[in-house]
Amino acid sequence: MMQDNQQEKFPLVDETGRVIGVATRAECHNGSKWLHPVVHLHVFNSKGEMYLQKRPIWKDIQPGKWDTAVGGHIDYGETPEKALVREVREELGITDFVSTPMGMYVFESQRERELVYVHRTVYDGEIQPSTEELDGGRFWSLDEIKDSLGKGIMTPNFESEFKRFFVH
């Protein structure tokens, strides 16, 4: 079975994104609440539907749940912009997209704290979800997403971000 590299190095940041240290994935996800940065890309098609990925059952955080189209940790020494391009290519096989930054915020769960850089794009090309990193994905209508909120189908991170940026 696949698993995350617990020795992978993540930057530690302050709430403005300034790098203040380095730690491993294991250290960041063990309840330390050390703030580390991630990138998210919300992918819409021209019909206004939102693509969600399904997290594989082997993930150390929120296995088997539906989540933001692209979400990934920023590597130590990497910019958020470079991380976004890398993660979109790795997770969905997309290399030709234009993203719009939507903002950033701190997400906190029982196990971790993340500084989330949120972006969106409209994309109608082919999506090839990684068979190594994901358990597939599909486009959802916004009503379908709203009807699924609070039912344990989606990650709490996605649900709070969806409400923050897309429910008005």
Image (cartoon, rainbow, N blue to C red):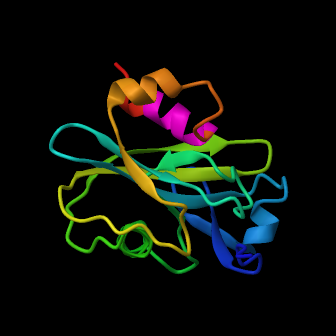
Query: Residue shown at 84%/59% (left/top)?
Result: 30
Tell me which segment is drawn in magenta.
Answer: 156-163
Residue 90 is covered by the magenta coloring: no
Residue 136 drawn at (x, y percent) = 48, 59
Query: Residue shown at 35%/72% (left/top)?
Result: 85
User: Left or right: where does residue 30 sit relative to residue 91?
Assistant: right
Q: Is residue 92 above or below residue 150?
A: below
Residue 56 drawn at (x, y percent) = 63, 60
Relative depth, front residue between 35 and 87: 87
User: Left or right: where does residue 118 sit relative to residue 121?
Assistant: right
Q: Quadrant of residue 155?
A: top right
User: Left or right: where does residue 31 sit relative to residue 159?
Assistant: right
- Image quadrant containing the C terminus: top left
**Tally of marks:** 0
Q: Quadrant of residue 88?
A: bottom left
Q: Look at the image and tell me whether residue 10 can be seen.
A: yes
- Image quadrant containing the N terminus: bottom right
Relative depth, front residue between 65 and 101: 65
Residue 89 drawn at (x, y percent) = 36, 74
Residue 159 is covered by the magenta coloring: yes
Q: Look at the image and tell me whether residue 40 can be seen.
A: no
Query: Residue shown at 33%/42% (left/top)?
Result: 50
Dominant secondary structure of the magenta stretch? helix
Query: Residue shown at 69%/59% (left/top)?
Result: 57
Relative depth, front residue between 86 and 13: 86
Q: Quadrant of residue 132?
A: bottom right
Residue 119 drawn at (x, y percent) = 34, 51
